[in-house]
C-alpha cells in the first residue's frame, strides 16, 4: 500500500515537472529545435545539395519555393526536418516535409533523404 502511494506521488511530481518545463519553453535534451543563424543556413545548404543529388540519382527535380520551418536534432548523426513548398516541373507548389539524416562518419550510405508531400501516397526516399 505504501509503495503504491510513493509511486503515485513520484508520477505526479514527474508530470508536474514536465508541464513546468513545457510552459517555461524548455525542451528536453535531444529534442528537435528550430534552427537559426548559421545553423539554419548550413541546414538549408544541405537541403539544396541533397535535392540536387536526388536529381542525379534519377529522382525528381524539386525546386524550393518557400521554407516554413527548419528543425535540427542530434541523433546517431543529425536529423534535419524541413517544412517547405516544393515544385516539380510545371506542377503547382506542394507543402512537403523533407527529412535529411546525415551520418558523416560513414563513408557509404551516410545520407538519407525522405520527402513526403501533402496529397501524395508515397514517400520519396534515397540514400547515398
Image: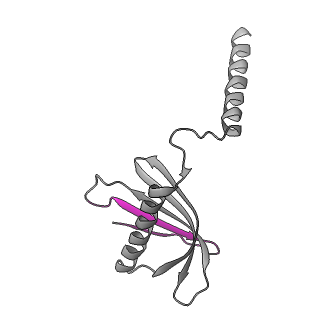
Q: Position of residue 31 (x, y in %)?
A: 54, 44
Question: Which residue is painted at 67% across and 29% down in the image?
Answer: 17
Query: Is residue 126 highlighted in magenta?
Result: yes
Foreground pick, 65 / 92: 65
User: Where does residue 75 sit, x and y in percent of width and height?
Assistant: 44, 47
**Picture mark count:** 0
Of 128 and 30, nearer the camera is 30
Q: Residue at x 43, y 73 (%)?
A: 51
Q: Which residue of the protein is positioned furthest toward the top in this rendering?
A: 2
Q: Is residue 33 above or below residue 85?
A: above
Image quarter of residue 19 = top right
Query: Residue at horizontal 55%, vertical 72%?
Result: 122
Quick check: 116 left or right of 113? Answer: right
- Residue 69 coordinates in the image, percent (x, y): 58, 62
Q: Residue at x 38, y 71 (%)?
A: 49
- Using the image, determine if residue 74 lies above or below residue 67: above
Q: Quadrant of the C terminus?
A: bottom left
Q: Position of residue 105 (x, y in %)?
A: 28, 52
Q: 16 or 9: nearer the eye?
A: 16
**Is 89 displayed left or right of 59 in the figure?**
right
Query: Is 117 one of the magenta-colored residues?
Result: yes
Residue placed farthest to the left in the image?
A: 107
The image quadrant of residue 117 is bottom right
Q: Residue furthest front?
A: 37
Residue at the extreme bottom of the image, as rendered: 90
Would residue 90 be found to the left or right of residue 126 on screen?
Answer: right
Q: Quadrant of the N terminus?
A: top right
Looking at the rendering, the stretch of residues picked out in magenta corresponds to 108-127
Amino acid at each position: 500500500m505504501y509503495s503504491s502511494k510513493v509511486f503515485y506521488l513520484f508520477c505526479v511530481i514527474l508530470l508536474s515537472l514536465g508541464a513546468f518545463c513545457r510552459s517555461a519553453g524548455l525542451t528536453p535534451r535531444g529534442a528537435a529545435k528550430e534552427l537559426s543563424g548559421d545553423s539554419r543556413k548550413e541546414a538549408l545548404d544541405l537541403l539544396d545539395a541533397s535535392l540536387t543529388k536526388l536529381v542525379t540519382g534519377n529522382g525528381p527535380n524539386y525546386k524550393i519555393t518557400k521554407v516554413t520551418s527548419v528543425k535540427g536534432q542530434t541523433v546517431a548523426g543529425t536529423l534535419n526536418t524541413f517544412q517547405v513548398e516544393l515544385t516539380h516541373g510545371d506542377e503547382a507548389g506542394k507543402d512537403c516535409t523533407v527529412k535529411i539524416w546525415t551520418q558523416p562518419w560513414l563513408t557509404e550510405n551516410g545520407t538519407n533523404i525522405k520527402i513526403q508531400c501533402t496529397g501524395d501516397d508515397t514517400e520519396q526516399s534515397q540514400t547515398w
